[in-house]
Image: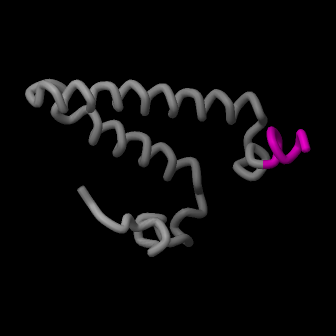
Amino acid sequence: MIDQLFLKHPREVNESYPQHMGVAMRFGFLMVRSGLACMIHGIVPALFTRTGSSMVKRLYGEMRQRQPDLEERTPAYLSPQWRPEYEI
């Protein structure tokens, strides 16, 4: 049970538990911070005009670099199960 909850996934991505926790916490913090900027942008459109999109691109680039076999896989956004039923 402990292996399944805490160790299996980090091992699958070739990281220790502390390494994976650090990366995941950093990604989460950056997403929350840019999400707050997006909400402020929604209220005052002149502020944070590129913060959200810039962070998405940055984190996507970092994630791609962490997955060396990515060239062999189809990107998730091209897979039908990951496409939204509607777009806003």
Q: Is residue 85 left or right of residue 25?
A: left
Number of marks: 0
- The single residue placed furthest to the left in the displayed view is 46
Q: Residue at x 51, y 33 (%)?
A: 27
State the extent of the magenta-drawn residues as a range. 1-8
Q: Residue 53 appears at what percent x and percent y?
A: 27, 42
> In the image, residue 79 lies at what x, y percent?
46, 73
Residue 19, quarter of picture: top right
Q: Nearer the viewer, residue 12 or 34?
A: 34
Q: Is residue 32 above or below residue 4?
A: above
Q: Is residue 63 magenta?
A: no
Locate the N terminus and report the quarter of the image it occupies. top right
Q: Residue at left 27%, top 61%? A: 87
The correct choice, above or below, for 64 with respect to 69 in the image is above
Main SS class of the magenta portion in the image: helix
Q: In the picture provided, is 41 more to the left or to the right than 58?
A: left
The figure's colour scheme reads one colour
Task: Report the residue at 60% width, 33% height from top.
Answer: 23
Between 6 and 44, the residue placed more toward the observer is 44
Q: Position of residue 81 (x, y in %)?
A: 49, 71
User: In the current view of this chain or complex, which residue is farthest to the bottom?
Assistant: 80
Q: Dividing the image into 4 quarters, which one contains the C terminus? A: bottom left
* Image coordinates for residue 56, horizontal then vertical, percent: 36, 43
| Horizontal arrangement in the rendering, residue 27 relative to residue 84 (left or right) | right
Q: Is residue 2 magenta?
A: yes
Q: Residue at x 22, y 24 (%)?
A: 40
